[in-house]
Image (cartoon, rainbow, N blue to C red):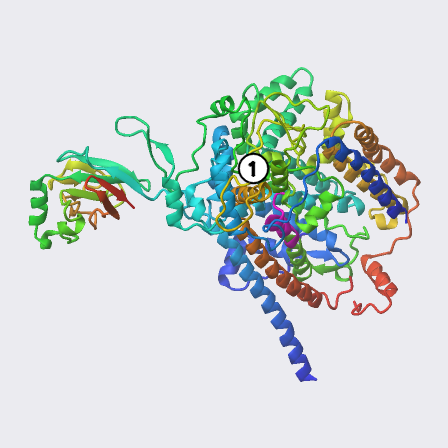
Amino acid sequence: MIKRSILLGALAAVAIFAAPANAAEGTDRPHRESWSFAGPFGSFDQGQLQRGFKVFREVCASCHSANYFYFRNLAQPGGPGFSEAQAKVVASSYQVTDGPNDQGEMFQRPGRLSDHWPAPFPNEQAARVANGGAYPPDFSVLAKARSYHVGFPGFITDAFIQYQEHGVDYIHALLMGYVEPPAGTTVQPGLHYNTYFPGHQIAMPKPLSDGQVEYTDGAPQTVDQYSRDVSAFMMWLAEPHLDARKRIGFQVFIFLIVLSGLLYFTKKKIWKNIAH
Amino acid sequence: MEGHSTYQPQGKIARWFESRLPLVGLLHSSAVSYPTPRNLNYLWTFGGILTFMLICQIVSGIVLAMHYTAYAPVSFARVEHIMRDVNYGWLIRYIHANGASMFFIAVYIHIFRGMYYGSYKAPREVLWILGVIIYLLMMATAFMGYVLPWGQMSYWGATVITNLFSAIPYVGETIVLWLWGGYSVGDPTLNRFFSLHYLLPFMIAGIVGLHIWALHHVGQNNPDGIDVKSVAKDTVPFTPYATIKDVFAMVVFIMFFAWFVFYIPNYLGHSDNYIPANPLATPAHIVPEWYFLPFYAILRSVPDKLGGVLAMFGAIAVLAFLPWLDTSKVRSARYRPLFKQFFWIFAVVAVGLGYLGAMPAEGGYVIASRILTVYYFVHFLVILPVLGLIERPSVMPASIADAVLARGAKGAAAPGAKA
Amino acid sequence: MAHTETSGTNRRDFLYIATGAVGTVGAAALAWPFISQLQPDQSVLALSTTEVDLSPISEGQIVTVQWRGKPIFIFNRAPKDVEAARAVPMSQLIDPQPDQDRVKSGHDNFLVVVGICTHLGCVPLGHQGNYDGWFCPCHGSQYDSSGRVRVGPAPLNLPVPPYTFTSDTKIVIG
């Protein structure tokens, strides 16, 4: 009885402390979207990854690098499902710097599957100069490098419902979060108002607008759809083996349930005549 | 518990070998015929689980080291190389990263079990202190391992933790310089941490050997905290009884482990560690890994640099003195009605400190951390010594067999309670 | 009664065997990722082609390029070297193979071979030895102008890597 009241008291105390933490953040919490790759049986939607790749290629890649993204990844299992030939075509449409050659000079040549995605700027300083002092972050693991505060008890239930999509929720919300600043807010020159960005003032101008990227599969050409697709693409970029991970995980669980069941009965049998 | 070996080598070669090196006899006496109290519950399976976790971490770590490079400009990229290009690299890295957390979950259950059942009391003081040393080495290993991916949390965690030593009067600054090998955390720091991160697990393995040796010398404690009086009546042989129970518990634990590895591999990590280390910008909230949070809360609750560091290390060091701080002669909380309540209060305080360690150091959180920190020390330095003097323990059974039979009788139709 | 006891024993044995078997299968499956990670990773596999421009290689010259971390010899042979290689009777060769099979027809002057001695893996020296080819300094093996072994202890000819001419002066190895 005493034990229980202590526990309840502690939980109550924790709940009281947890409340101001959410308020203190000052930014809206991103809405939880339904992602095809969420949950124990989730997997990437190839069509969505291809559309997301198109958005990335035509819009994002003009400022953002993706240095751990290789052309060969486009044809690997669990990805957007391009054939090796298609991936080669994509690769050869970009010029990459190679060398030095026999004359000791660097030269440009068409990309190969073993090349990584060419960065739009040669270094961070060049990127900052071109972007008003801000550094567009590398896309490679960005979907895992972003999150939002969940608080108590959400952070515990997330472990049970296996929710790991905070990064993509945030990216989608951010891309949708460009609104008119509320009255009385002064936006610094060169910055833009965004509901979901910490501090609300973001250097990136609104990158997407309706109809900007042409889809050939009939998906709606809206900012909402674009940002969903590019977020999913970024999740794949950050976690390219997600499909395999969940598939193997399911097999492992089936195996462990069988083994632990057998061990349970073996244990019972062995201890049958021993009081303990 | 030497001398219980019933091992008789069969055959000429076995006899020849055994008379020169009694290795099989040693294994037999410590893992087969070793008498274990028959009343052990599942909390006693965590020793075996911890051994498994140590092996798991060493094996996966050796594999990761085959693909990793400790060089500040490339370490982040090398970890991503493991995650993307190495065959099953993502699996092995997630096993290792989550394995550290599983190791700590198991060790905390193991420690709290020892506290609840008085496993630190005579004659098990040395056994307990060896355990505290293992715990310290685990913390050092985990901390240095977390630095290796060279993300933002790695870098700033390393900066904050190494700066703790700067609080030491006179020599602090020099010690920090030695730890860094430079004027800030940098490539030399990363390299020495990698070297030590590889070394320490083998030191842990060595101390674990001593820990198990001490355990087998004095015998296991048990939930009733009563000494074994008759090997025949009070104990069962380790194999098959304890072995099968340990293996079953281990597989259940692996299931829990697999939940994290396959489905929520980044749940226990921090998203900021997927941002490459940047010496020019600290993340908005810097938090250590969850298993350090109670101590981190204690550190922050003291508004003085040296005081905070002393309180934090004191909170760990006080564990080593537990055998003498607890003045009660009765081991198990089962027969200590008052201690039992204070144990649970302490457990809640420890979890509360962990929660506060993750919260920003402001307002109500700071006040709460201070209250809980004071209570943490009061528990060890005041409550435990006094409790032993004033508490009246309840009546204890004469032997383990009696305790088991009494419970069997209470459970009325407890089937199979023949022995 | 006896019958019941026997079946009880069997059931218990079956449980033990099943548990042991499932456990063994699991341990073996767990070992696989740890073995598989030793194989060449995706980034290594992706680097398996090398492109070489042959136009700067003058007659009689041997250049060394890298393919999959190994040295590749490209020998622009003079007509007399080709003739000499083709005049050798098969019976004199340790590892008989005609020169025609070791080059691409139409580009007979270009010999492309993996520059690793088939004895124990050293890199042979060009334009040395008695056969207008290579001499291995480690254990004295000699190769002719077609990269064929002429003096042991090496047992085999220098292997020809897979390659194709993408134009008259360009090859892609791998």
Compared across the picture, whether B242 is left or right of B352 comes to: left
Q: At 84% across and 31% down in the image, what residue appears?
A: B371
Which quadrant of the rendered structure holds the C terminus of chain B?
bottom right
Foreground residue among B231 and B250: B250
Compared across the picture, whether C109 is left or right of A10 comes to: left
Q: Is residue A7 magenta?
A: no
Prevailing SS of the magenta stretch: helix
Foreground residue among B331 and A233: A233
Chain ID, mark 1: A
B212 above or below C24? Answer: above
For mark 1, what is the residue? A209
Image quarter for residue A262?
bottom right
Foreground residue among A111 and B142: A111
Q: Is residue B142 visible?
A: no
B321 above or below C163? Answer: above
Q: At 77% across and 52% down in the image, what residue appears?
A: B222
Image quarter for residue B305?
top right
Residue B143: image location, x then y, percent: 62, 34
Crowd tier of the residue under label 1, counting other residues whose Cα lies within 10 Å: few below 14, some 14–19, many 20 or above: few
* Residue extent of the magenta highlight: B255-266
Question: Which residue sits furthest top?
Answer: B170
B238 above or below A209? Answer: below
Foreground residue among B220 and C146: C146
C9 above or below B265? Answer: below
Which amino acid type is marked by label 1? Ser
